[in-house]
Amino acid sequence: MKRVHGKVALITGGASGIGLSTASLLAKEGAKVVIADFNTAGAKEAAAKINEEGGEASSIFLDASKEDSIKEAVDFTVKQYGTITVLFNNVGLTNLQKDLDVVNIDLDEWDRLMNVNLKSVLLGARFAIPHMIKAGGGSIINTASMSGFTGDVIRSAYGASKAAVVNLTKYTAAQYGKDNIRCNAIAPGLILTPAAKNNLTPEVLSIFEKYNALPYHGEADDIGYTALFLASDESKFITGQTIQVEGGHYIANPTVPDFKAFSEQA
Ligand SMILES: NC(=O)c1ccc[n+]([C@@H]2O[C@H](COP(=O)([O-])OP(=O)(O)OC[C@H]3O[C@@H](n4cnc5c(N)ncnc54)[C@H](O)[C@@H]3O)[C@@H](O)[C@H]2O)c1
């Protein structure tokens, strides 16, 4: 039996990166998937590829900053496949020019990121949960970030919104567990999705690599496989958790690389 056979999944931001990987892995493992994205052409292409490969997928335009659009994506999923039992709330973004330090951050950008990164997670759950209750249960997976656990020189709104996603995950899990609905989050470290590859210079990538415990960067499938596990019944006793998928970047005392270099010199 395939790992998510018979499940119906809505994936937001499914046309690229982490969402695209998850859509394709869920479909390969037997789920019917709806790819919802701002990038209509990309979402259509991703669904077509899954169908060509023998899976079952559809696509719909989504603007995750708009309540009506999120409701439409949930309704479309139910209309298309009869129910929704997996929701991957994955859309999230920042703007490095405007999402700055606390003194200088653009306040309109703060509001925009709280809306797209956090409120969309609440709304996805709000619209999907009644259908999941009818279906006898479901799994909600939210994409958080390691930026929700640490401080940084910029990206104050991104970090605060992702920290809130971590806690909203616990609230959702606490409130709907008795309905057999699980809610978990994944906190990626740096993952080499197209967005990350385009934005980061080799110098910046080498700073990340220096602090990873593992000798390589994360890829979209590293998150996709975690989402697949959380969508499947293999994780049926896990709820309210945030799984950190970050190559051991944040696990050690930050002085470790310096002390290692120091001891090698001595
Ligand atoms: N890549 C990383 O290093 C990394 C690290 C931590 C967390 N994350 C989180 O992972 C998630 C996915 O990121 P990714 O790296 O795969 O990004 P990506 O840019 O490759 O994919 C994001 C997708 O979301 C879509 N999208 C953006 N805004 C949207 C909106 N308002 N409505 C609907 N669709 C929208 C884009 O069109 C795109 O297809 C985000 O929540 C991000 O914050 C990524």
Image (spheres, rainbow, N blue to C red):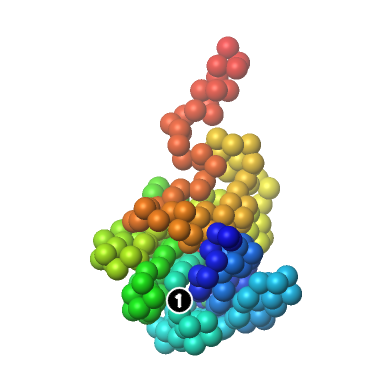
Badge 1 marks a residue whose secondary structure is loop
14 or 26: nearer the viewer: 26
**Residue drawn 51% across the image and 40% down it:** 249
How far across and how far down the image is residue 81, in percent? Answer: 52, 82
| Quarter occupied by the C terminus | top right
Is residue 240 found left or right of 5 in the rendered image?
left
Quick check: can you spot residue 158? no
142 or 58: nearer the viewer: 58
Q: Quadrant of ligand 1?
A: bottom right
**Residue drawn 50% across the image and 55% down it:** 229
Residue 162 sits above or below residue 10 on the image: above
Is residue 179 found left or right of 143 in the rendered image?
left
**Residue drawn 29% across the image and 63% down it:** 177
132 or 13: nearer the viewer: 132
Residue 226 sits above or below residue 49 on the image: above
Quick check: can you spot residue 256? yes
How far across and how far down the image is residue 99, in percent? Answer: 45, 63
- Which of the 4 image quarters holds residue 100? bottom left
Q: Which residue is mark 1?
A: 84
User: Which residue in the rendered view is the most extreme toward the top?
Assistant: 266
- Which of the 4 image quarters holds residue 35? bottom right
| Quarter occupied by the N terminus | bottom right
**Residue drawn 33% across the image and 65% down it:** 180
Residue 230 sits above or below residue 113 on the image: above
Amino acid at the residue labelled 1: Ile
